Image (cartoon, grey):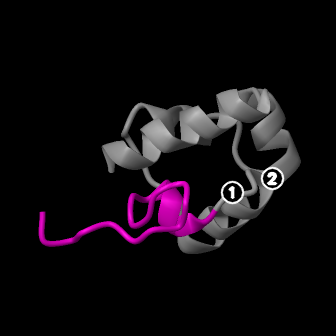
Amino acid sequence: MEYFAIKLLEKMKEKGITQKKLYQELNIGKNQIHYWVKNKAEPDLETLKRLAIYLETTSDYLIGLENEDGIKANLSE
């Protein structure tokens, strides 16, 4: 899910959040974020929900189902 990695990094940069701060705040494994941004793993649903809340966005945005304005993606493309 390359889109997730891109959007996660964008939101982290926008909010000035480091990988270290994110894993500490969300109490997740130290290397987990590294695996996500390198497309070697994906978060489970509960973690995705916590990420969205912490980053003040939606899980749909993080996985590419909507844009920043909340407009749903065209899934037929």
Question: Callout 2: few (<14), some (14-19), or many (20+) C-alpha neighbours within 10 Å?
Answer: few
Q: Which of these two is toward me, 9 or 73? A: 73
Image point (39%, 58%), residue name: 64
Question: Callout 1: few (<14), some (14-19), or many (20+) C-alpha neighbours within 10 Å?
Answer: many
* Residue numbers of the magenta segment: 58-77
**Secondary structure beneath disc 1?**
helix
Magenta stretch, main secondary structure, is: loop
**Secondary structure beneath disc 2?**
helix
Label 2 or label 1, whichever comes before in sequence order: 2
Task: Tell me the quarter of the image containing the C terminus.
Answer: bottom left
Q: Position of residue 26 (x, y in %)?
A: 81, 52
Label 2 with label 1: CB-CB less than 8 Å: yes
Q: Position of residue 57 (x, y in %)?
A: 67, 59
Q: Position of residue 7 (x, y in %)?
A: 50, 43
Query: Residue extending furthest left?
Result: 77
Q: Tell me the residue that label 1 is attached to.
A: 51
Q: Which of marks 2 and 1 is in front?
A: 1
Q: Is residue 72 magenta?
A: yes
Above or below for 75 versus 8: below
Q: Which of these two is toward me, 1 or 71? A: 71
Q: Position of residue 62 (x, y in %)?
A: 51, 55
Amino acid carrying mark 2 in the image: Leu
Q: Tell me the residue that label 2 is attached to.
A: 26
Amino acid carrying mark 1 in the image: Leu
Q: Is residue 47 shown left or right of residue 18? A: left
Q: Quarter of the image holding residue 39?
A: top left
Image point (76%, 63%), residue name: 53
Q: Is residue 31 shown left or right of residue 3? A: right
Image point (56%, 66%), residue name: 59
Q: Distance between the residues labelled 2 and 1?
A: 8 Å
Q: Is residue 38 shown left or right of residue 77? A: right
